[in-house]
């Protein structure tokens, strides 16, 4: 065991999926390719303009707070966070300081400090010849910030927390949180301290703007090793802000870490105070919280679904909804498990990521499972039928009839097939009679081939055994 204990806290920003920006009526469109089109005098901070609070953004953060077991504020306000960067046209960011919308909460055993709401900054693009460009489409977009307590102890735990939060945001419908698009960004505060110094935390560094789960884990792992090496050399860790170089696989120093007093927070005089219980849109929000990922996992495990399939459903709400519809129709445990096997293994591959195709199967899929379980078709035939259903949406029995996939169980017809195979394979017959029972599978396989897959394999096996006993 290492002599040093890592302590990690996360700050996670997520752009909210509202129609308009946080304080103006400009379109909130993360997919807009043309720069500087979704802007107006308010989000560009022209003199004399006044911001107006986006109620839907506030509601979204409150719903996240409820989903994570946080305490919703009775009173909240917005503050000005003063600092000058080219991507902040006002020279300050509207954020929240003393009175966040949500306090406390927990996710995957990690305690939360707060969840608050602010506005996003412009997107910077650094090009050749030391030229930097700014796209202000993103400036003013509602940005949720979630802060954890410093209770995470490993890079793996931090990555798991970030992944689970992304799922929760998607289940609630408040954010897409695509990290590759910058819709969700993670900042990690990391320190290490000797395990012998119980209760004493080391000097922390902040690694900013981690834009993938892999980067989160790799940056934390690197920073833990770097800080231990610093302490082992007899030096002190410096409190600073660091960046992550993906190509080098290393963090690098950016600037001295600011403290809250450096930002000179004060209440924004242009925005009203929020007395949340008096605002009707924020009442009864508990009723809007859907089944959350971990709740779904527990429910599916009680149905006897394999862990691998449970994770597939919890990570894909559309697939989970399709499975739940099938469960409601099938009800029997045997059929439910068979349905899960076909959905998580065969259907996922056939869809190829196009979940719109599921609409073709909602009505007919339960009947397909009943047909597959009946023994009327082979497992190979079932796969072919499912593939055709994805393409056309036709009923399973209609496809089976048209393609001649119903298995033959007529003994008189199958006896002819068995006799032909036995006559053509005298050595295999002799081997079986000397105790080599594995040969039986070969003979059944030849019978299936002869019948072009139409024979009932169980019936075929029984007939072979009866003939070989003679």
Image: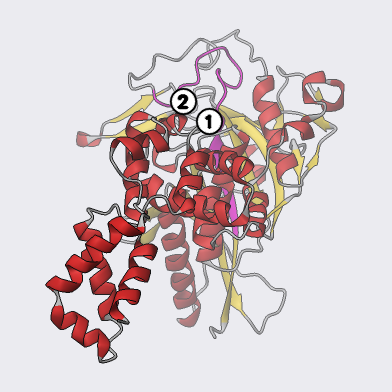
- In-image side of 171 versus 349 (left or right): right
Q: What element carries label 1?
A: loop
* Tag 2 residue: 138
The answer to which of 209 and 174 lies nearer the viewer is: 174
Disc 1 vs disc 2: Cβ atoms closer than 8 Å? yes
Tell me the tag on residue 226.
Answer: none
* Residue visible at 41% across and 57% down in the picture: 214
Q: Looking at the picture, does residue 410 appear above or below residue 81?
A: below
In this rendering, would 73 be left or right of 34?
right
289 vs 159, nearest the viewer? 289
Look at the image and say whether residue 18 sits in the magenta stretch.
yes
Asked if residue 431 is among those painted magenta in the image, a careful observer would answer: no
Answer with left or right where residue 113 lies relative to residue 143: right
> Is residue 18 left or right of 53 when viewed as pictured?
left
Residue at 77%, 19% (x, y): give it.
Answer: 272
Q: In this view, does 254 lie above or below 200?
A: above
**Magenta part of the chain:** 9-31
Residue 47 quadrant:
top right
Badge 1: few (under 14), some or many (20 or more) residues near its Cα, within 10 Å? many
Q: Position of residue 213 (x, y in %)?
A: 45, 53
Badge 1 or badge 2: first in the primary sequence: 1
Is 341 or 355 nearer to us in this picture?
341
Residue beneath the point at 50% across and 42% down: 319
Mark 2: secondary structure: loop
């Amino acid at each position: 065991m290492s002599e040093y204990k890592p302590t990690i806290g996360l700050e996670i920003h997520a752009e909210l999926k509202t129609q308009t920006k946080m304080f103006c009526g400009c379109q909130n469109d993360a997919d807009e390719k043309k720069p500087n089109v979704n802007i107006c005098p308010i989000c560009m901070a022209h003199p004399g303009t006044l911001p107006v609070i986006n109620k839907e953004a506030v509601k979204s953060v409150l719903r996240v707070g409820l989903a994570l077991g946080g305490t919703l504020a009775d009173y909240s306000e917005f503050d000005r966070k003063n600092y000058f960067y080219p991507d902040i046209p006002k020279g300050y960011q509207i954020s929240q300081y003393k009175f966040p919308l949500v306090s406390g909460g927990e996710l995957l055993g990690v305690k939360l400090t707060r969840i608050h709401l602010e506005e996003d900054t412009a997107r910077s693009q650094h090009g050749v010849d030391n030229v930097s460009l700014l796209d202000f489409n993103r400036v003013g977009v509602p940005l949720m910030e979630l802060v954890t307590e410093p209770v995470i102890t490993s890079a793996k735990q931090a990555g798991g927390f970030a992944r689970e939060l992304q799922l929760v945001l998607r289940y609630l419908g408040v954010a897409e949180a695509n990290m590759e698009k910058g819709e969700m960004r993670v900042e990690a505060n990391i320190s290490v301290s000797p395990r012998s110094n119980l209760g004493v935390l080391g000097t922390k560094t902040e690694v900013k703007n981690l834009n993938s789960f892999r980067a989160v884990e790799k940056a934390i792992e690197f920073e833990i090793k770097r800080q231990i090496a610093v302490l082992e050399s007899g030096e002190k860790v410096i409190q600073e802000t660091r960046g992550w170089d993906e190509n080098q696989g290393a963090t690098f120093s950016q600037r001295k870490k600011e403290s809250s007093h450096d930002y000179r927070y004060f209440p924004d005089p242009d925005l009203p105070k929020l007395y949340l219980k008096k605002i009707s849109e924020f009442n009864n929000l508990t009723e809007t919280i859907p089944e959350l990922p971990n709740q779904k996992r527990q429910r599916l495990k009680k149905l006897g679904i394999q862990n691998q399939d449970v994770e597939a459903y919890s990570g894909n709400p559309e697939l989970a909804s399709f499975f739940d519809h099938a469960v409601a129709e099938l009800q029997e445990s045997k059929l439910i498990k068979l349905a899960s096997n076909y959905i998580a293994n065969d259907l996922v591959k056939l869809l190829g990521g196009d979940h719109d195709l599921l609409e073709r199967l909602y009505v007919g899929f339960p009947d397909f499972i009943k047909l597959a379980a009946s023994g009327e078709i082979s497992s190979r035939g079932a796969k072919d039928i499912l593939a055709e259903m994805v393409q056309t949406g036709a009923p399973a029995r209609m496809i089976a009839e048209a393609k001649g996939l119903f298995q033959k169980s007529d003994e008189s017809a199958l006896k002819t097939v068995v006799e032909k195979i036995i006559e053509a394979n005298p050595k295999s017959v002799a081997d079986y009679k000397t105790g080599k029972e594995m040969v039986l599978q070969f003979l059944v396989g030849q019978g299936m081939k002869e019948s072009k897959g139409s024979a009932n394999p169980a019936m075929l096996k029984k007939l072979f055994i009866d003939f070989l006993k003679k």
